[in-house]
Image: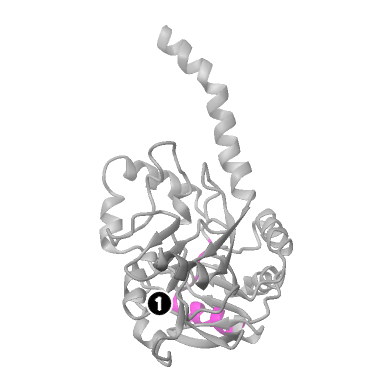
Amino acid sequence: MVILGLVLSLLPLSLLTLAYAVLGEPYRPIFKRHRLPLPSSWPKDLSIVHISDLHVRRLDQRLLRVQREALGRLPTPDLLCVTGDVCEKVDDIPLLVDVLRSVKPRLGTFVVLGNHEHNAHAPHKIREAEKRGIWRLIGAILHLVAPKITSDGEEEGHAMAEALRAAGITVLHNEGVRVHKHGRSVWIAGCDSAWAGHADMQAAMRGRRPGEACLSLIHEPDLAFDAEALGADLVLAGHTHGGQIRLPLIGAPYSLRLDPRIGIASGFQKLEAGLLHITTGLGHTIPLRFGCPPEVVWMDTDPLAAEEELAA
C-alpha cells in the first residue's frame, strides 16, 4: 500500500514533467554566446552562428515558427553555419530557405548535409546496441511515434542540395570556400555525411593554404579528429541533438557517438590542436527534450585571447 501510495502521489508530477518534455522544451530554443580563443591566423571578431538539425517539415508548423523567431531575433553575424539534417523532403526546402533567410549574414550561409537528407541508416554498431536491454524497448516506442516522412535516399538528398544552391545558399559537398575579414582569410571546409558514406575530408581541405585559418563543418562529430588532423582549428558538428534528454549527475544517456574520443554529447571539447563544438540542434524528429533545449549558438573569434593563454 505504501508503494502504491507513493506511485500515485508522484503520478501528477510525472505527467507534468512528460507534458513539459513533449510540449514545452522542444519548442523553447535558447541563445548562447561564446568568445573563442583561436590561433593568431584568425581574424579578430569574426562572428559565427552555428545551428543544426532543424528537421524542417510542413507538418510541424509550431517548430517552423519558433525556429524563424529564434533566428529573426539575432543581430547580423558574419557567417551562418548549418551542420546537417536540415530537411526531410525536397518539397519542404522552400520552408527551410524561409527560416534560414531570417538571418542575413555578411559573408554567407554555409550548409553541409546530414544522414537524414540521404535517409542513411545508423551504422551496424549502433543498430546492434539498440537491440539490447532497455534500448530495445525505448527504440520500439520511439519507432511508433517517429515521423514517417523521410527522404527517398541519395537522389532526393542531392535534389535538396541543388534546391538550396538555387536559392543562393552555399552547400559544401566535400569542398571548401574562402572568406575574408580584416584582411585575413578563413577556409571553410564542408564535409558530407559519414553515415551516408559520403565523407571526404581531404577533398574538403583541398585548396586551403598552409597555415590558413580553417573552419570545418561536419554533421557527425566522429569526423572531428579527421578534420583537426588535416588542419581545422574549429570544428562545428550536430547530429546528437545533445541526447535530447540530459539527467542530473548522469548527463545524456544516449548520444549517437561512435568515436570514444568524443567525450561530450553537446558543447565544446578540446581536440589536439583544435576545438570541437557540438550543438543540441534547433529541431527534432521526435518532440521530446528534457534538460537539453534546442539552441542557437553565436561565437566570436578572439585570437588575442589564444596568444595570452600561450604567454601565460
Q: Is residue 65 visible?
A: yes
Q: Secondary structure at mark 1?
A: loop
Magenta stretch contains residue 166: no
Residue stretch rendered in magenta on the structure: 149-163
Which part of the image, by quadrant, shows the N terminus?
top left
Residue 90 x %, y %: 58, 75
Q: Foreground: 273 or 129?
A: 273
Which corner quadrant of the image does residue 74 belong to?
bottom right
- Is the residue 267 above or below the residue 231 in the image? above
Direction from residue 67 to residue 171 in the image, left or right? left
Most common SS among magenta residues: helix
Q: Residue at x 29, y 62 (%)?
A: 259
Q: Residue furthest front?
A: 311
Q: Is residue 218 visible?
A: no
Circle 1 sits on which residue?
232
Q: Residue at x 39, y 90 (%)?
A: 210
- Is the residue 123 above or below the residue 129 in the image? below
Which corner quadrant of the image does residue 49 belong to?
bottom right
Which part of the image, by quadrant, shows the C terminus?
bottom left
Direction from residue 220 to residue 95 in the image, left or right? right
Residue 257 x %, y %: 34, 58
Q: Amino acid at mark 1?
A: Ala
Packing grade of label 1 (10 A; few <14, some 14-19, many >=20) is many
Q: Residue at x 62, y 42 (%)?
A: 23
Residue 131 x %, y %: 28, 49
Q: Foreground: 165 or 76?
A: 76
